[in-house]
Image (cartoon, rainbow, N blue to C red):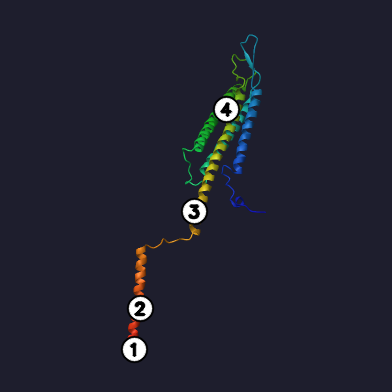
Amino acid sequence: MAVTHADLEPSPPSSDLGSKTGACLMVLSIFFGLFCFILCLLAEATRSQVTWSSDEQECVYSGSGKVPLLCGAAAFVALAIAMIVEHTFMLISISRSTSSPLVIWDPDSDFAKSVACQAAFFFVSTWICFAVGEILLLIGLSIESGHLKNWATPKSSCLILRPGMFTSAGVFGLLTVFLAAGLYITALRAQRALQDQENVRREVLEAASSAIYTTPTRLPPLPPAVVNQNTVATQYRSQRSLSDYLTEFEKYSYL
């Protein structure tokens, strides 16, 4: 079995956006969003109703409101957990990103502008949907908790929720987790683009360094003046050695 370069690369850390931990946490947050939506439907189906007397001067609740109160409270907590899990993980991943600080985007490029616009849209819309959903759930909880005791006692006024309040909260909860998933995908795209840019820069540097070490160094040719000086010096040394040799020969010949 052949071993490729991808097999030799270290696995991404658990805090990385593209890791298995990130994918599992995103799926978990979506599951909490679906769970919140189901609980909101149950709360809507079991919400308290009001029955008026024949003269419409007294009203009686149809139930204590415990079931919709528990379902609404569980939906509130589930949506908060989904939001906290998604955004906390993304903040930790971005803060611990291993991308080189030398690799930056061109702010005028089309890709950078599109990613920035998408991230801003998903971030703002996620928090708006989350705030609206949680506020609707809080309103429902406050109203349903107002008649836990003596709910069967006739009253002159009865406060109830409008139809569709809990359902709207569940819809906003679903929008929250799906928009947060869109923000996660956008951040993952940006990180992958930075990693690709860093890999290209590293390959260029490695190619340049290998070319420098493999190419033999060639010295530039000497100027003509230096060549002539070397030639004259060589001829002078050869003539001087010949004259010295003749002088020594004459000295020994007289002897």
**Which secondary structure, mark 3?**
helix
Of badges 2 and 3, nearer the viewer stands 2
Q: What element carries label 2?
A: helix
Please name the residue that numbered disc 3 is placed on.
208
**Residue 7 in picture, x, y percent from top left:** 62, 51
In the rendered view, tell whether residue 167 sits above or below residue 28. above
Question: Disc 1 designates what residue?
Answer: 253
| Mark 4 vs mark 2: in front | 2
Q: Kindly indicate the quadrant of the structure image that contains residue 83.
A: top right
Q: Pinpoint residue 149: horizontal percent, then vertical percent.
A: 62, 22
Q: Which residue lies furthest to the bottom in this view?
A: 255
**Residue located at (34% from left, 82% from top):** 246
Front residue of 154 and 197: 197
Proximity of marks 4 and 3: CB atoms separated by less than 8 Å = no
Lateral position of residue 65 relative to residue 98, left or right = right
User: Does residue 171 appear in the picture of this structure?
Assistant: yes
25 versus 169 height, above or below:
below
Q: Earlier in the sequence, mark 2 or mark 3?
A: 3
Q: Mark 2 points at which residue?
A: 241
> Which residue is nearer to you in this view: 190 or 225?
225
Viewer-closest of 225 and 186: 225
Q: In which quarter of the image is the N terminus?
A: bottom right
Mark 1 to mark 4: distance in Å? 123 Å
Work out how far the residue at label 2 is from the one at label 3, CA to CA, in angstroms: 51 Å
Q: Dot 1 lies on which element?
A: helix
Q: How far apart are marks 4 and 2 (CA)?
A: 106 Å
**Rendered image quadrant of residue 37:** top right
Q: Which of the image's four quarters has the C terminus? A: bottom left
